[in-house]
């Protein structure tokens, strides 16, 4: 008969999850506990492994891809095997607990399962604020332990620990215990854990007094900020039963959003930079994309009607926190337009004291529209479906104004069929037909709305053919983009020779770049000093013989939160667009003001939008022809004083004009 293996209980959680006190309580069940009190051997193995990755377990960054299958992992696993053999030889069941195990479980799991049966993972879950208290300066009293004064750092670490822990334990034998449950009902929580352990081990365990853990305050309702609501959404998904598919989808989406690094791995900064700014930027990006079902204030129909009358009579009254919110419905939260047309307006409105929230069109389909209570509903690039139609019907019945926000000329199928939108014209026929159908949906919803919103006056003129009530609310930048831009502007990232740059983004701008390829090559060949940097995934293969390779630099496409670093490396920013093209003429001047924020002057195509924005020779330069493109590139490359003057003036004007807080005031002037 085969000798029965010892069992192993692995207690893992984030730094605020009280896993150490819980492990000490479980030790009273008779488990052998060599790792209690932070086992030196386990800590050394984990620390040495992390050192090979250039990080600590408390770093608020994703662990590198493939880190558990490289040579360092193999060496660490050999040491883990030796350590676990010693534990198994000691006889009796084993209890393991170490703070890094929440993130490094995959390094240990297979070795544990090979030596112990069963391996039961007790996943201890706290709220994010508890983790911050546990990681605050002086909380650990150990020079080798984390001392985190930035709440964003703590929140990011909480997210990484819990999302990684939930993922690698999925499919394993695991028990979930929340600190709230133990703190509020220790007897009930302890009893439930003991019963679950008895079932997992297949034997009775001795009765113990309830574990004593510090009281954890429960988040008050309504939660005070969007950050708290987003973290609470993740907490609820982590607390959900294992088979909850919505919770699993939420956690997988959150994990993907956390993979972005700030700055990007190929971007460098000196050690004097305030890393807390990067943590804040990363967390803000995550929060802005983390979707949760908004909570709407309960208001009677009489109050709703009276408030609407008051707003119509007294337009300028200030918003109140108890007011119904501006509700944005985002057709595609993964698109960059979500940042400019949904996220930034919401942040600006909130800073002005006006409640605002958003949900995706997909979540709207799972929401009971009768629960919605909004001051105004704004649809951003939504497709017409049953959920959107139901929302429009709800707005009509309750007298709630509904607007349609569109930021590109993609609602006119007739213009699309002319081939003026180059990236659509080059698509296979089925994909072109899908764009035509999408244009018809946009047109129908714009016509059904009470008003439309566009970022430029040129686009507004096209939109007025569909709906005469059109307001222009420009695209702008957020507070964290301004802070990052100021940081990179002060870092001195530019090279000794003038660097001409183009942030193309995706390959959809190939036709735009083609308009300046020849004059750019002429300017570069006139003198060897300037270089050209392309940021993005644009294909330069057609220009191999045209552009001098020695003066060419390729930089990868970056997330928007890292764009300011790339722009700050430029001395001259190019903004080419196809001339006399209705689609290009209607585009927002993003590439101009984002370069201006880092003090970089722009040379832009002389289309209607840029002619309205740029005063030639004062806050930028305009080019009407290929000859002017070549001449102006040469002029800027040879005149550092002119570059400095244009960049400074553009920055001053753009900070005043395009800040999200300034633009948010325009939403308060809508007919709501």
Image (cartoon, helix red, strand yellow):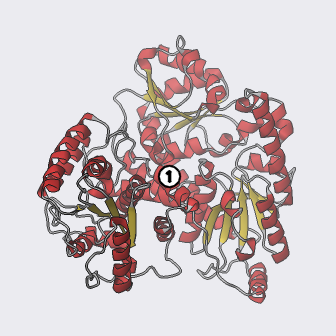
> Residue 113: x percent and y percent?
30, 51
**Residue drawn at (37%, 35%) of the image:** 494
Task: Pick whichever, 337 or 383, lies toward us.
Answer: 383
- Residue sitting at 35 percent across and 51 percent down? 61
Residue at image position (43%, 58%) is: 283
Q: Quadrant of residue 69?
A: top left
Question: Viewed as shown, does residue 286 lie left or right of 304?
Answer: left
- In this view, the residue in front, 388 or 237, is 237
Q: Where is residue 165 in the image (x, y as percent from the top left)?
A: 37, 57
| Residue under label 1 | 652
Residue at 80% in and 65% down: 390
Q: In which quadrant of the rendered view does residue 413 lie?
A: top right
Front residue (pair 590, 333): 333
Provide residue 394's location: percent of width, then percent of height: 80, 71
Query: Could you say which quadrant of the image residue 301 lies in?
Result: bottom right
Is 668 on the left or on the right of 210, as rendered? Answer: right
- Is 440 on the left-hand or right-hand side of 662? right
In the image, 579: left or right of 199? right
């Amino acid at each position: 008969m085969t000798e029965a293996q010892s069992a192993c209980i692995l207690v893992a959680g984030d730094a605020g999850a009280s896993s150490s006190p819980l492990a000490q309580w479980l030790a009273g069940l008779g488990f052998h506990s060599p790792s209690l009190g932070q086992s030196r051997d386990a800590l050394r193995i984990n620390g040495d492994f992390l050192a090979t990755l250039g990080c600590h377990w408390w770093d608020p960054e994703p662990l590198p891809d493939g880190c558990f299958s490289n040579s360092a992992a193999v060496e660490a696993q050999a040491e883990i095997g030796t350590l676990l053999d010693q534990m198994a030889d000691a006889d009796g069941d084993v209890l393991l607990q170490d703070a890094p195990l929440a993130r490094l479980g995959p390094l240990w799991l297979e070795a544990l399962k090979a030596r112990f049966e069963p391996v039961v993972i007790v996943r201890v879950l706290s709220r994010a604020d508890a983790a911050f208290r546990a990681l605050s300066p002086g909380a650990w009293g150990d020079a080798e332990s984390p001392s985190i004064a930035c709440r964003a750092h703590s929140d990011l670490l909480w997210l990484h620990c819990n999302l990684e822990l939930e993922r690698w334990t999925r499919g394993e034998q695991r028990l979930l215990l929340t600190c709230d449950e133990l703190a509020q009902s220790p007897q009930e929580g302890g009893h439930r854990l003991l019963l679950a352990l008895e079932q997992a081990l297949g034997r009775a365990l001795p009765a113990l007094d309830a574990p004593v853990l510090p009281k954890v305050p429960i988040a008050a309702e309504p939660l005070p900020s969007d950050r708290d609501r987003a973290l609470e959404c993740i907490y609820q998904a982590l607390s959900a039963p294992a088979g909850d598919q919505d919770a699993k989808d939420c956690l997988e989406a959150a994990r993907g959003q956390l993979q972005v690094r700030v700055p990007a791995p190929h971007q460098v900064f000196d050690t004097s930079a305030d890393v807390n700014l990067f943590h804040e930027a990363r967390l803000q990006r995550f929060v802005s994309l983390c979707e949760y079902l908004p909570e709407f204030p309960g208001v009677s129909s009489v109050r709703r009607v009276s408030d609407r009358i008051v707003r119509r009579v007294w337009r300028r009254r200030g918003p109140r926190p108890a007011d119904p919110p501006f509700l944005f419905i985002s057709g595609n939260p993964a698109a960059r337009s979500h940042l400019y047309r949904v996220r930034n307006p919401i942040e600006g409105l909130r800073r002005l004291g006006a409640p605002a929230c958003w949900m995706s069109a997909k979540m709207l389909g799972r929401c009971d529209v009768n629960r919605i209570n909004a001051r105004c509903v704004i649809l951003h690039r939504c497709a017409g479906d049953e959920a959107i139609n139901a929302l429009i019907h709800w707005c009509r019945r309750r007298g709630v104004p509904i607007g349609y926000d569109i930021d590109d000329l993609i609602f006119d199928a007739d213009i699309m069929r002319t081939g003026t939108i180059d990236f659509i014209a080059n698509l296979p026929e089925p994909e072109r037909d899908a764009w035509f159908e999408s244009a018809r949906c946009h047109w129908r919803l714009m016509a059904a709305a009470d008003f439309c919103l566009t970022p430029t006056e040129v686009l507004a003129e096209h939109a007025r053919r569909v709906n005469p009530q059109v307001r222009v609310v420009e695209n702008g930048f957020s507070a964290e983009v301004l802070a990052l831009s100021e940081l990179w502007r002060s870092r001195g990232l530019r090279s000794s020779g003038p660097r001409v740059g183009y942030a193309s983004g995706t390959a959809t701008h190939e036709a735009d770049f083609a308009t300046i390829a020849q004059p750019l090559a002429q300017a570069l060949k006139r003198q060897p000093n300037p270089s050209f940097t392309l940021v993005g995934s644009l294909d330069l293969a057609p220009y191999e013989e045209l552009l001098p390779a020695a003066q060419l630099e390729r930089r990868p496409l970056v997330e928007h939160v890292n764009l300011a670093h790339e722009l700050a490396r430029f001395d001259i920013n190019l903004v080419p667009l196809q001339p006399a093209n209705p689609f290009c003429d209607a585009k927002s001047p993003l590439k101009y003001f984002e370069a201006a924020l880092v003090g970089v002057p722009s040379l832009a195509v002389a289309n209607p939008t840029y002619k309205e924005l740029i005063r030639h020779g004062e806050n930028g330069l305009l080019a009407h022809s290929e000859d002017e493109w070549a001449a102006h590139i040469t002029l800027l490359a040879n005149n550092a004083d002119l570059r400095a003057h244009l960049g400074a003036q553009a920055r001053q004007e753009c900070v005043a004009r395009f800040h999200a807080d300034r633009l948010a005031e325009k939403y308060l002037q809508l007919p709501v």
